[in-house]
Amino acid sequence: MSVKHGLLALLCEGPRYGYELKAAFEARTGEAWPLNVGQVYTTLARLERDGQVERDSEDAEGHVHYRLTDAGRREVQAWWDSEVEREAPPRDELAIKLALALTVPGVDVVAVLQRQRTATVRALQAHTRRRRALPPDGTAASLVLDSLVFAAEAEVRWLDHCEARLARQSRTSSPARNGARA
């Protein structure tokens, strides 16, 4: 997720200062991806350097408000107009962990799978609780949380698939041949 583009999108509504951007981003995404306020101000500084935002005003409390420039409007419009690339997915730490667990001697891969399933189900329950607690007008946050729920459900199915495949493999071959205990 591009914090840069998220901030630019929020600035389309008008000038804001860093903490307002952080709060708006978190509210709209169901608090699924908390932002560090330092990250917000670092990103704003880069956007200002790149000519996509500029300082607009300062309020009585000393908060510097930023607003979009024409370059910032073009950048966020280009973001809206482009698809999210899926061909080069981000590295999936869990898939890497399981691939390595299968090839490193002495790792109890089934225990790794079971621990992950427990953690994923716990995350699924937390996402579901947050989604249920949203106000009726929380459609944006609800859609983000729906995405996280569906991803967690898919991960549980994938973990079940991995465990079943390892069980089939252990019935047909010696665990020592693949370098792991299944």
Image: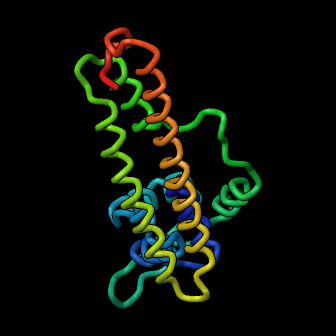
Residue 149 versus residue 18: which sits nearer the camera?
Answer: 149
Which residue is at a point 61% across and 87% down the rendered structure image?
137
Which residue is at a point 40% across and 58% down the rendered structure image?
121
Image position of 14 with respect to 92: above or below: below
Residue 57 x, y percent position in the rendering: 48, 80
Image position of 87 with respect to 47: above or below: above
Residue 8 versus residue 86: which sits nearer the camera?
Answer: 86
**Colouring of the image:** rainbow
Residue 18 versus residue 171: which sits nearer the camera?
Answer: 171
Q: Quadrant of residue 140?
A: bottom right
Q: Is residue 11 left or right of residue 17?
A: right
Residue 74 x, y percent position in the rendering: 71, 58
How many tags in the picture?
0
Quarter of the picture holding the C terminus: top left
Q: Quadrant of residue 85?
A: top right
Residue 43 x, y percent position in the rendering: 44, 57
Q: Is residue 91 left or right of residue 146?
A: left
Residue 116 x, y percent position in the rendering: 35, 46
Residue at the extreme right of the image, as rendered: 81
Q: Is residue 93 left or right of residue 138?
A: left
Which residue is at a point 39% across and 30% down the rendered structure image?
98
